[in-house]
Image (tube, rainbow, N blue to C red):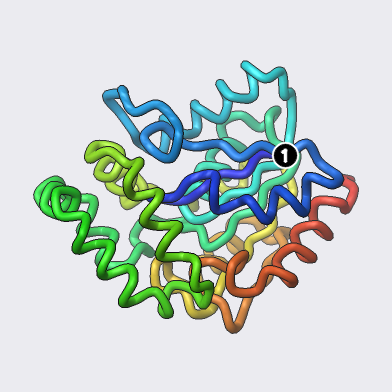
Amino acid sequence: MILLHGWLGSWGLWQETMAYLGQSYRTYALDFWGFGESGKKRASYKVQDFVSLVDQFMEQLGIERAPLVGHSMGGTVSLSVAIQYPQRVRKVVVIGSPIVGSSLSLLLKLFGRRTVAYLVYNNLWGLRVGFRLLSPFYTRDPRWPEMMDRDLSQTTLESFLLSIASLRETDLRPHLPQIQAPVMGMYGDKDIVVHPEQWKPLQAGLPNCRIERFSNAGHFPMLDDPARFMALLRDFLDHPVS
């Protein structure tokens, strides 16, 4: 199984998920280029680059086919892999992921503009303070600000800018019917990062997909309601593909 993080995140988000699922699955958590511990010397950090990265990662490790589990941008990448490399994907789980880039919050859309991104990136202390002050609106997990501090310090200006700019322009709706693998969408009703009703275009494009909503969770259901998150994830992954 391959776990994919969201914008400004890293594999560290998945540590508890890996510990749980690692009992039954060989589990990998991949850092996208420009984030976490991955390489930073690239000209492009667009969503399409990350789709290609997943294919290359699987090729290098000899993984023919696997479930993909993605949070936020990582879920958008997972669905894109299922569209472009269907032979790679056994199942897809998306968590708080934008199907349409216009569903991103206004703040994230602004971060996709070079002038704004330059100002924010060169004053990351302000973003860190903002995350700490607004942390309860993102997740109830008190560890989250420290996680963001760590991941922000490993991000470059270009990866900060280009990834969110390309995500903002993404629209998977015309391509969803091409997906052959089983899909589950998990969305928090209190999400302030991605519109909480992005499960609707996912379900419209894939009528047979499974939707699970978290009434008391925001953008990070795995942090806000870990027990239910793990149980649902395990149930979906363990169910045999017909």
Give the residue furthest to the bottom: 216
- Residue 61 at x, y = what percent? 67, 20
- Residue 51 at x, y = what percent? 50, 33
User: What secondary structure is found at the residue carrying circle 1?
Assistant: loop
- Residue 138 at x, y = what percent? 43, 73
> Which amino acid lies under the numbered mark 1 shown in the image of this protein?
Thr
Quarter of the image where one finds residue 231 = bottom right
- Residue 66 at x, y = what percent? 73, 35
Q: Residue at x 77, y 54 (%)?
A: 20
Q: Residue at x 70, y 28 (%)?
A: 87
- Judged left or right of residue 27, residue 83 is left
User: In the image, is residue 75 above or below residue 55?
Assistant: below
Badge 1, how many Cα within 10 Å: few under 14, some, many 20+?
some
Query: Dot 1 corresponds to which residue?
Result: 27
User: In the image, is residue 197 above or below residue 156?
Assistant: below
Q: Look at the image and tell me whether residue 173 can be seen.
A: yes
Between 64 and 218, the one nearer to me in the picture: 218
Q: Residue at x 62, y 63 (%)?
A: 203
User: In the image, is residue 177 above or below residue 81?
Assistant: below
Between 238 and 202, the one nearer to me in the picture: 238
